Image (cartoon, rainbow, N blue to C red):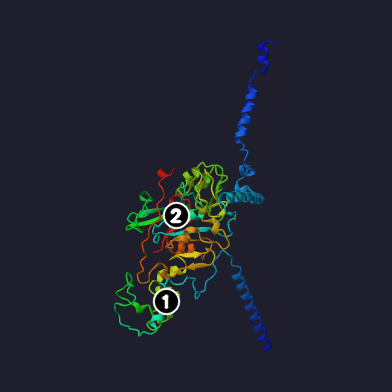
Amino acid sequence: MKNRRIYFLVAFALVAVVIFVAVAGHAARREFWLTPPKGESEDYMVPPPPFTEGIFPCSECHSGMTPNPKRRELKEEHTNILLKNHAEKERWCLDCHDEKNRDKLRLASGQLIDFTESYRLCGQCHGDKYRDWKVGIHGKRTGQWNGRKEYLLCAHCHNPHNPRFKEIQPMPPPARPGTIR
Amino acid sequence: MSDRETRGKHIFRLSRRKALKGLAAGVGALAIPGKDASAAIWESFFQKNFRELRPAEIQDVVARLEKEYSTRYGKPVRVKTSPALEGVLYGYGLDLSRCIGCRRCVYGCVTENNQSRDPQIQWIRVLRLDKERGVDLEHAEQYYNPANVPEEGHFYMPVQCQQCENAPCTKVCPVQATWKENDGIVVVDYNWCIGCRYCMAACPYGARHFNWKKPGLPAGDMNPDTHYLGNRPRPVGVVEKCIFCMQRTRELDGKYPACVDVCPVGARKFGNLLDPESEIRYVIENKRVFILKEEINTQPKFYYFYSF
């Protein structure tokens, strides 16, 4: 009886090993031109957030201050920050910035995240854009078409406080055939 | 001896045979490159079609061209001949709902691919279209020049070589100097092209351009990373076109084409159509996609799409 159980265990272990080797072998056989699988938790390669110079870490000024959670117009500091084109009636600073730890952003769930992960904050409302951004469709991606890709944070193209994309000057138009000599 | 006889002896009598001999020799001498011409000119004169070259011959050709370009532009120039990667079919996506018509791609392409600056040759043409009319090429404007883009009521559609699977341009070439490679890129052998411009007439997208004059490419602006079938400096009298930046993309760690890298709004997507996980496959499977002039069955691998 005992022998049979051991045989069973050994056979089971063997089968497990065979399956593992087969799966691992299959994974290793992936060809170089296919996109490597990406775990859900894996971070995206992004350059550092586009802070105004000297503004980060926020705690440098804010650590000694008592937070005032009352919604109001800022008169002394950050007067250049205007919420525009971004549901300004419904929201204000502390909806995204954490009240106690100013060096972090706060998700609706209460979870604190770094500024380098700000796409998770934007993705709370803009889920369709977040989904496209993750697969590299929304927004600019540079790097290698068959390898390492570099993402940009939402804030690199959209000012988070006024996110509409800014107009830019176009490059010169082509020469008309008549003017080419 | 009388005067008459002497004259008869020394007179240069031009017989028919002599005349023909002389004519043949003269014409032959004209065809021979001048005294200062090096052996390189002979070699390029007798060079075969790129697809008929043996590996050893390709090495000679590359060595000759690298030497020639390096002297001409005063810096080490590399001429690659990397073949199509196995298992790769390039596809391109362009997001019409994002493009703002800033023409950064046009000039990014010119810089990367050594187009002639003067006379001007550009491989990408950005069309301005009316939102009211939709994709109506009859009302497209390519010379728009406002202070800022995007403009109210308009959208923009860049057009370049669509890398057709069923490419009309390759079929009309009388000398087979242009063909579709295995990774889907349509290429031109500039040394074999005779400049008849049939392919330009056949292309429904206006994507081919002719070097009417010797390309004006300042040495300082020359990109020394080149490909034989791609962005190497072109001679006068040949046709050129977008080649998906093969000097960048045909690598194991292939970069994106220059136009993708330079686009400020990320409207341009590039990838391998045979890779189910690639960006371009995601676009085709999940977005509203169309190809330009679908009805003529050229089967482009250039997909316009709307991301929302």
Of all residues, the one furthest to the bottom in this rendering is: A2
A78 relative to A145 in the view: left or right: left
Per the model, the C-alpha gap separating discs 1 and 2 is 37 Å
B32 and A150: which is toward the camera: B32
Quadrant of the image containing the C terminus of chain B: bottom left
The numbered mark at residue B106 is: 2
Q: Position of residue B187 (x, y in %)?
A: 54, 50
Q: Position of residue B289 (x, y in %)?
A: 43, 59
Q: Are marks 1 and 2 in contact (CB under 8 Å)?
A: no
A157 and B272: which is toward the camera: A157
Quadrant of the image containing the N terminus of chain B: top right
Q: Position of residue A114 (x, y in %)?
A: 44, 77
Residues at discs 1 and 2 both on one chain: no
Which amino acid lies under the numbered mark 1 shown in the image of this protein? Phe
Q: Chain of mark 1?
A: A
Which amino acid lies under the numbered mark 2 shown in the image of this protein? Val
Give the secondary structure at mark 2: helix
Above/below status of A75 relative to B228: below
Residue carrying label 1: A56
